[in-house]
């Protein structure tokens, strides 16, 4: 089964706001915040690169699946590293959301591997692909929310607490 339109979320668009706004705290130049900004920038760059690489895969070429899976594995590592960050105290309430995003990405990547590496009936294959895609989108949705909060924006209908 070929999936030519693999990624539905633009990583570059999600993260450009973080890179440009420097976490929405223009007057706070503490070493902790500067380090955090750099790590967020690194994360954003890594997911934008993975996004670009996945979308550049030619699905007409035999073995394209391995190229996609390699990029997804890289993406999974980036999400894990982001989830492991120690967020500055002003943003520590977002750590749990980063961990959720990582967990969803891990599930997505695991299921994409399953889809591309195993044989299933058309119905089962579509169901498994849908499940992987839903988890992938959930991961990115959490990153969008984190980016919004880092920029001082409040997403409609979203509540993030310290609990």
Image (cartoon, rainbow, N blue to C red):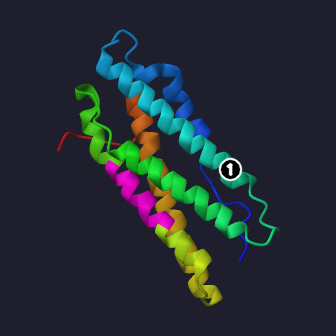
Q: Secondary structure at mark 1?
A: helix
In the figure, 46 relative to 69: above or below?
above
Image-based side of 16 in relation to 31, left or right: right
**Left or right of residue 2, residue 75 in this image:** left
Prevailing secondary structure class for the magenta stretch in the rendered image: helix
Q: How many marks?
A: 1
Determine the image quadrant of residue 66.
bottom right
Q: Is residue 152 visible?
A: no
Residue drawn at (60%, 37%) of the image: 13
Is residue 92 shown left or right of residue 153?
A: left
Looking at the image, which is closer to me, 11 or 49? 49
Q: Is residue 124 above or below residue 88?
A: below
Residue 91: image location, x then y, percent: 29, 31
From the image, which quarter does the C terminus lie in? top left
Q: Is residue 21 above or below residue 8?
A: above
Kindly tell me whether residue 148 is visible in this rendering: yes
Residue 143 x, y percent position in the rendering:
44, 43
Q: Is residue 100 magenta?
A: yes
In the foreground, 160 or 117 = 117
Residue 40, how many percent across, how many down? 44, 32
Tell me what residue is drawn at x 53 percent, y 28 percent: 17
* Residue 86 image offset from top left, x and y in percent: 28, 36
Residue located farthest toward the right when viewing the structure as drawn = 60
Residue at 60%, 88% in the rendered image: 120
The quadrant in which residue 161 appears is top left
Q: Is residue 124 magenta?
A: no
Q: Residue at x 45, y 58 (%)?
A: 105
The magenta span reads 99-109
- Residue located beneath label 1 in the image: 53
| Front-most of residues 48 and 14 | 48
Asked whether, in this view, residue 109 is left or right of residue 84, the answer is right
Check the image and name the residue furthest to the left.
163
């Amino acid at each position: 089964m070929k999936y030519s339109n693999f990624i539905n979320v633009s990583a570059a668009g999600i993260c450009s706001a973080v890179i440009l706004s420097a976490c929405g705290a223009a007057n706070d130049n503490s070493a902790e915040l500067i380090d955090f900004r750099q790590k967020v920038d690194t994360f954003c760059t890594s997911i934008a690169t993975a996004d670009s690489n996945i979308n550049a895969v030619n699905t007409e070429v035999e073995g394209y699946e391995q190229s996609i899976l390699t990029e997804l594995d890289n993406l999974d590592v980036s999400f894990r590293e982001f989830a492991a960050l120690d967020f500055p105290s002003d943003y520590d309430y977002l750590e749990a959301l980063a961990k959720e995003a990582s967990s969803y990405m891990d599930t997505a990547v695991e299921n994409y591997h399953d889809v591309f590496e195993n044989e299933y009936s058309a119905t089962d294959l579509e169901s498994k692909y849908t499940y992987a895609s839903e988890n992938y989108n959930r991961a990115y949705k959490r990153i969008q929310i984190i980016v919004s909060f880092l920029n001082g924006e409040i997403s409609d209908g979203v509540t993030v607490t310290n609990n």
